[in-house]
Every structure is written in C-alpha cells, then in structure tokens.
Image (cartoon, grey):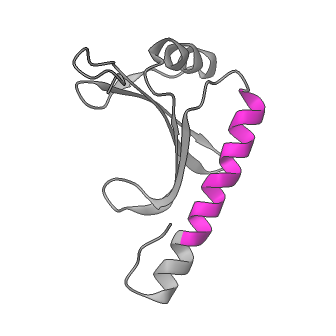
Amino acid sequence: MATATTPADLIRAAIDTLAAARAAETLLAEHPELPVARLHASGTDDDDRVGPLLEVQLDTNLDALAEYAKAIGVEVEEFTETEFRAVTTVRGVTVWVTAWEPLDSDPNGF
C-alpha cells in the first residue's frame, strides 16, 4: 500500500515497496531459519522519509532476533520500551527485524 499527494510520489512509493518485497526474498533465502510472523514492505519509514523499507516481524521471539543480529554482526537496538530491532540493509533496502517483549497482561503477548 502506498499513500502520496502526487502520482509521481505514488509511483516512487510503489517502486520502493516492490524493492522492499524483493529484499524480503533475498533476506529469507539467506536466513530461512527466521521465524517470520509478518512482513511489511513500504516506500516510507515511520517518519515518512521516502525510501524502501522492509520490516520483518518476529512477534515475541527475542531469542531469534538476538541470534539473527549476531549472525549478521549488528547490535539489537531498543526502539521502544518493549520493541527491539536489528537494522541492516539488503539490496539497498533498509531492513528492520523486529521483536517485542511479551506483556504479561495481554494473553497474545502484546
């Protein structure tokens, strides 16, 4: 999905989203052990900066996130109090591999 104010911006966002989806193919071919819960490909990040972005969500699997980060040689960053990320680049696309600390009050762990 892409949102924009001009057709040119919409096209750029769609192209970036496709690039992020292709990066997902590469990442998962290289790391098939990742227990992916969801993939999110877009042409913008949370601050609406234009550019391809892929988020690989591992739900509450912090161990898998730590193992992935170690395998690629990056640190796990605390994004929020309960959300953690390993950030890298694949095929020119910014990639966030994300996991959350489970909350005891929510039966789904979020």
Residue at the spot 61% in from the left edge and 24% down from the top edge? 35
As drawn, is 86 to the left or to the right of 25?
left
As drawn, is 29 to the left or to the right of 21?
right
Residue at the spot 27% in from the left edge and 24% down from the top edge? 82
Q: Which residues are magenta?
A: 14-31
Q: Residue furthest bottom?
A: 7
Percent across and percent down for residue 37 are 55, 33
As drawn, is 48 to the left or to the right of 96?
left
Image: 24 above or below 60: below
Percent across and percent down for residue 10 are 49, 79
Image: 6 above or below 72: below
Residue at the spot 56% in from the left edge and 79% down from the top edge? 11
Foreground of the two, 27 or 70: 27
Percent across and percent down for residue 16 are 57, 64
Q: Residue furthest front?
A: 107
- Tell how many labels: 0
Foreground of the two, 32 or 106: 106
**Res. 29 image quadrant:** top right
- Secondary structure mostly seen in the magenta stretch: helix
Image: 67 above or below 55: above
Percent across and percent down for residue 78 are 31, 25
Residue at the spot 37% in from the left edge and 84% down from the top edge? 5
Quadrant where the C terminus sits is: top left
Q: Is residue 19 magenta?
A: yes
Foreground of the two, 96 or 62: 62
Q: Is residue 26 magenta?
A: yes
